[in-house]
Amino acid sequence: MIDKSDVRAAAERIAGHVRRTPVLESDAFGVSLWLKLEQTQHGGSFKARGAFNRLLAAAERGALPPSGAVTASGGNAGLGVAYAAGTLGVPARVFLPRTAPAVKVAKLRALGADVRAVGDKYADAQDAALKDAADTGALFCHAYDQPEVCAGQGTIGLELLEQTGGAFDTALVVVGGGGLMAGIATALDGAAKVVAVEPERCPTLHAALDQGERATVAVSGVAADSLGASRIGEIAFDVARRTGVGSVLVPDEAIVAARRALWERHRLVAEHGTAAALAALLTGAYAPAPGERVAVVVCGANTDPSDLVRA
């Protein structure tokens, strides 16, 4: 699967291609915490890290074809691949479910990606992307379940340790397919605890941990566009069990409130899926022990901000 050496190698490989995103200390939510502002990353989310690591590693092996890269995505993974591929001068095709938010589709096209809408679920888009890769020889970039992708996302954890001097005990990380959690939990193993946060209506990791095996679950709700994988990734499930990651669930109304709170208290624009991590603190789904120091990964901002400003 992946280990810390993979994350360190990814950090070296993608240096100069991704932003070292800032950390904001905050006491605006009833507890002192650090916010890792990964929504300021290229493409508007953490996904550029894994995409660059996947493409650059393929280039090192001589396996980055002229036909470029192909991915399936609810939006953010596609944006990461499109940005990385454009930077490296290769084409990108992104397969999306027809339910993908218009703001993400517009950004994909602005980045020069060949955007193709297929079906109503992520699984439909993935099937189409896999067929395209087989037909064209393009490099398939999984949204969350490839070692190079997960290791790239894990570089956030290394940065967070460096930027805070390791002065936090727990990191709250949202989970959809689990690539972000897998990378960060690997990077922080032995240094800090990772708690996975999921919407009640997208409980992929929660269900897998409860049942002892990866299970397919129904997904819906306000965060389904970014956290709507119906099955936790194999790598993420392995890392969660190996490193002791647990999952807490938050309702949609708490996610909406947390998203607005990020805007109102810090003028931070975040997606609903991103805001789920903070919602765990605001609802008490995760209650820090006295003196426990917490970091929250704010991982994406590809959203329509018009509803953040009250009429």
Image (tube, rainbow, N blue to C red):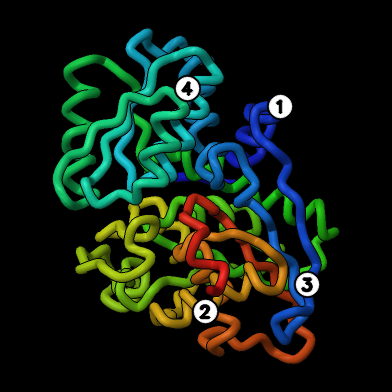
- For marks 1 and 3, the one nearer the N-term is 1
Q: Position of residue 31 (x, y in %)?
A: 74, 83
Q: Which residue has dot 2 on it?
A: 257
* Depth order, front residue of 278/139: 278
**Quadrant in the picture for residue 270:** bottom right
Q: Position of residue 69 (x, y in %)?
A: 37, 23
223 sits left or right of 59 in the view = left
Q: Is residue 101 something that shows in the picture?
A: yes
Instruction: Assign a secondary structure to mark 2.
Output: helix
Instruction: Assign a secondary structure to mark 1.
Output: loop
Mark 2 Cα-neighbour bin, 10 Å: few <14, some 14–19, many ≥20: some
- For marks 4 and 2, the one nearer the N-term is 4
Q: Amino acid at mark 3?
A: Ser
Q: Which residue has dot 3 on it?
A: 26
Q: Which residue has dot 1 on it?
A: 16
Residue at x 50%, y 12% (from the top left corner): 89
Marks 3 and 2, how far apart at CA: 17 Å
- For marks 4 and 1, the one nearer the N-term is 1
